[in-house]
Image: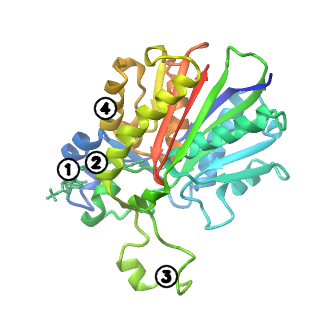
């Protein structure tokens, strides 16, 4: 039986640190409000002219490939999750493929917002299990700072999000003790407009951005914060339990839960619902904010770098986000 295992992890965050205090230059907010409601202390914003969605992903991928003891030329497929591509099309996966010098290698571009990385991981896993590919690069990368309305009007959204990229190299293995056990993917399009960016949409009377579209906030992230919070608090534990049950485990068997970094309050609530001690839940939202598809690979990489993941550990990844989408992955590391 062929399984997939994580052979290498990497991440990149832009050097520009934006603190909560820095945001008070643009909007009426406070460090205390942001920390109390979200746990976020700072986030990174890309530097125009230096970072692109694809260049950040390339840096993260090079690190992951190197740590796997491989060369870029060993990659047989790229699965690239982003909500904020450099171009409307083609996706940033193609730009990263070019930067890595991997002309001819297949690229699958995934959106799926905050659940994007687990969807990407699941797709890579299926290709490996069927024997089609042996080495697949899975990426999450976002530049969200340009999309945020940084005035007081947009503050409920703007304070949450940041930029960054993370990557994992998945490789085929026949070792049942160190592998991706299962992935679980869900979505409910009835809530599509609870967290979305409407423009530039195709089903419009005109291709041009009108003043009306801009004034109505069509290019801004629109979020119903309380609806997102309510659904996340149900879906996170549900999809984690689903992964555990599928593999005959209980919450107490989890060595480390890495939730998508949406909000520290959500992570803390989920931890309590699962009755896990604080040291078994990984959080780094304090330093990066919510980096959407990049959040899980950045957190997974940092957890590994900090020695919080050891060989044989049971690692659970879980995500919830726009769509609504939610997903989990259980890994025997
Ligand atoms: N700074 C200061 N005040 C702010 C603010 C900010 N950044 N954002 C909103 N406020 C104000 C509001 O205007 C409101 O003022 P009012 O009472 O005078 O009307 C007050 O704070 C409360 O706003 P509300 O939106 O009800 O706050 P909340 O307690 O629900 O917290 C979120 C807002 C966004 C932090 C919360 O809804 C949340 O975490 N939702 C989930 C979001 C999420 O995880 N998104 C990503 C999913 S992948």
**Above-or-below relation of 36 to 219:** above
The secondary structure type at the circle numbered 3 is loop
Locate the N terminus by quadrant: top right
Q: Are marks 4 and 3 in contact (CB under 8 Å)?
A: no
Residue 210 % position (x, y): 45, 85
Mark 4 closeness class: few <14, some 14–19, many ≥20 residues within 10 Å: some
Q: Are marks 1 and 2 in contact (CB under 8 Å)?
A: yes
Residue at screen point 22% across, 40% down: 36
Secondary structure of the residue carrying tag 2 is helix
Badge 4 is on which residue?
Answer: 269
Residue 20: numbered disc: 2
- Residue wearing tag 1: 30
Residue toward you, 252 or 245: 245
Left or right for 130, reference 291 = right
Which mark is first along the chain, 4 or 1?
A: 1
Q: Earlier in the sequence, mark 4 or mark 2?
A: 2
């Amino acid at each position: 039986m062929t399984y997939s295992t994580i052979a290498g992890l990497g991440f990149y965050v832009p050097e520009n640190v934006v603190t909560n205090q820095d945001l008070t230059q643009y909007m009426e907010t406070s460090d205390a409000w942001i920390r109390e409601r979200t746990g976020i202390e700072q986030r990174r914003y890309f530097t125009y002219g230096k970072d692109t969605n694809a260049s950040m992903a390339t840096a993260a991928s090079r690190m992951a490939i190197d740590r796997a003891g491989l060369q870029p030329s060993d990659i047989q497929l790229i699965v690239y999750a982003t909500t904020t591509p450099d171009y409307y099309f083609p996706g940033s996966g193609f730009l990263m493929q070019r930067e890595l010098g991997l002309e001819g290698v297949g690229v699958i571009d995934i959106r799926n917002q905050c659940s994007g990385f687990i969807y990407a991981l699941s797709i890579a896993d299926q290709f490996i299990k069927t024997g089609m590919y042996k080495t697949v690069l899975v990426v999450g990368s976002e530049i969200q700072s340009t999309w945020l309305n940084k005035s007081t009007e947009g503050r409920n959204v703007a304070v949450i999000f940041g930029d960054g990229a993370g990557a994992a190299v998945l490789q085929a293995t026949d070792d049942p003790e160190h592998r991706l056990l299962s992935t679980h993917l869900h979505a409910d399009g009835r809530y599509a407009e609870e967290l979305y960016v409407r423009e530039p949409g195709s089903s419009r009377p005109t291709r041009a951005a009108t003043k009306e579209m801009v004034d109505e906030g069509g290019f801004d992230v629109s979020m119903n914060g309380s609806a997102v919070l309510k659904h996340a608090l149900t879906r996170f534990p549900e999809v984690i339990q689903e992964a555990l049950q599928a593999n005959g485990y209980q919450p107490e068997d989890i060595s480390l839960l890495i939730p998508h970094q949406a909000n520290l309050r959500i992570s803390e609530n989920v931890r309590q619902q699962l009755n896990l001690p604080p040291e078994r839940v990984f959080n780094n939202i304090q330093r990066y904010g919510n980096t959407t598809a990049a959040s899980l690979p950045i957190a997974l990489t940092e957890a590994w770098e900090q020695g919080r993941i050891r060989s044989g550990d049971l690692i659970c990844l879980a995500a919830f986000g726009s769509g609504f989408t939610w997903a989990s992955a259980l890994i025997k590391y």
